Amino acid sequence: MVDTSARHSILVGIDGSGSALHAARWAAREGRQRRMPVRLFHACAVPPGAAAATETLVEQGHQWLRLAKDEVSAEVPDVDVHTDLRVGPAAREIVDESAKSRLVVLGSRGLGGFQEMLLGSVSVAVARHGHCPVVVVRGRMPDDPPPATGPIVVGVDGSPVSDAAVEFAFEEAGFRNVPLVAVHTWLDVSVEETWAALPSDVDWDAVAEDESRVLAERLAGLSEKYPEVEVRRRVMRDRPVRGLLSEADGAQLIVIGSRGRGGFAGMGLGSTSQTLLHHSPCPVIVVRTPDF
C-alpha cells in the first residue's frame, strides 16, 4: 500500500543494481535529515509480446524492493520506508509519481528499467518532465558510494530556475550543517574561441567586480533567510561545467537548475548537466520549480 504522505516523501528508483542501493541509502539519510518517509519504487516494464513473463518480472521486482528495504532499514533504522511496484515503462511511471514526491532519487548506473540511465531516455525524460527535484547519485567512479562529507556546490546564473536551485542548495546546506559554494561563471564559451572577437581594451577586473556584485545580490536574501549557512562565493571567467567541476572535488553534492540562461544557458538538460552526470565525483541534483 502506498504511503498516504507520498506528496511529502522521497521517491527512489529501485532496479536491482548496486547503484540503486547507493541511491536508496542516500535517500534514507536525506529522509532522516528532512524528517520525510522514503518510498522505494520499482517500475516493471514488460517487453512487447512477453505478457506471460509478467508474473516473473513482478516477483523479481518485489525481491529487489525487499532487498533495498532491508539495506536501508539496517543502515538508517529511524526512517519510515515504504515500497511500491507498478507495471509500466520506467520513465513514465517515475515522472507520474514525481508529482506526488518531494524528491526523486536515481542511481547512476542501472539494470532493467534503468539500463544506461545516464545516456538513455529515462534520466532525460525524468529530468525534463519531473515535477520535483531529481537526484542522480554517484561517487568518484560510477560504482563508488557517494561522498558523505564536504560542502554543497550550486550553479548561479540569475534565472528563476537558478534561484530555485540556489534556495534548494541553501536548504540542503542548512540540513547538513556544511558550507555552500556558490559558483557563477560569466563567459559561456572558452576564451580561446572568442578572444579575437572581444575588444582588446576590456577591463577584466571591472567585469569581474560587476559579476561578483551580481552574485552577491542573488544570494543576499537567502543568506538572510539561512544565516547559519556559510557561503563561499566563486566568480569565474570560464564555462559553467568547468567552474562547477573545479569546485566539485571534495564536495558532497552539486545542485543545478533544470534550465538556464546567461552564464548557464542550457545547463538543465544540455551539455553542462550531461557532463556533470558523467564526471561529477558526487551526486547531482537537477532542480525544477515545484508545482505543488
Image (cartoon, grey):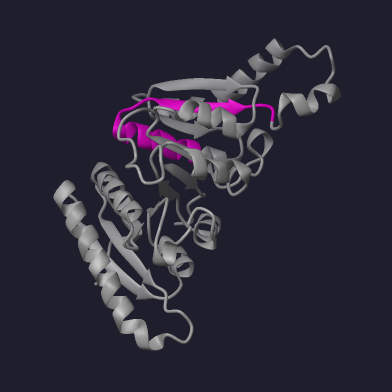
Q: Is residue 184 magenta?
A: yes
Q: Position of residue 98 (x, y in %)?
A: 42, 61
Dividing the picture into quarters, in which one does residue 45 lie? bottom left
Write the start and end of the magenta stretch as one range. Answer: 164-187
In the picture, measured across the screen, residue 97 lies left or right of residue 37, that is right
Is the C terminus in the top left, top right, bottom left or bottom right quadrant? Answer: bottom left
In the picture, measured across the screen, residue 161 lies left or right of residue 174, that is right
Seen from the viewer's position, the closer of residues 212 and 252 is 252
Residue at horizontal 30 percent and vertical 83 percent from the top: 55
Give the answer, above or below, for where 248 lies relative to 54.
above
Is the N terminus in the top left, top right, bottom left or bottom right quadrant? Answer: bottom left
Give the answer, above or below, for where 118 lies relative to 163.
below
Seen from the viewer's position, the closer of residues 61 and 177 is 61
Q: Position of residue 109 (x, y in %)?
A: 42, 53
Give the answer, above or below, for where 3 lies relative to 161.
below
Res. 218 visible in picture: no
Q: Position of residue 198 (x, y in %)?
A: 82, 22
Res. 253 visible in picture: yes
Residue at horizontal 55 percent and vertical 39 percent from the top: 162
Q: Position of residue 256 (x, y in %)?
A: 52, 40
Q: Is residue 33 magenta?
A: no
Seen from the viewer's position, the closer of residues 210 and 144 is 144
Dividing the picture into quarters, in which one does residue 212 lie? top right
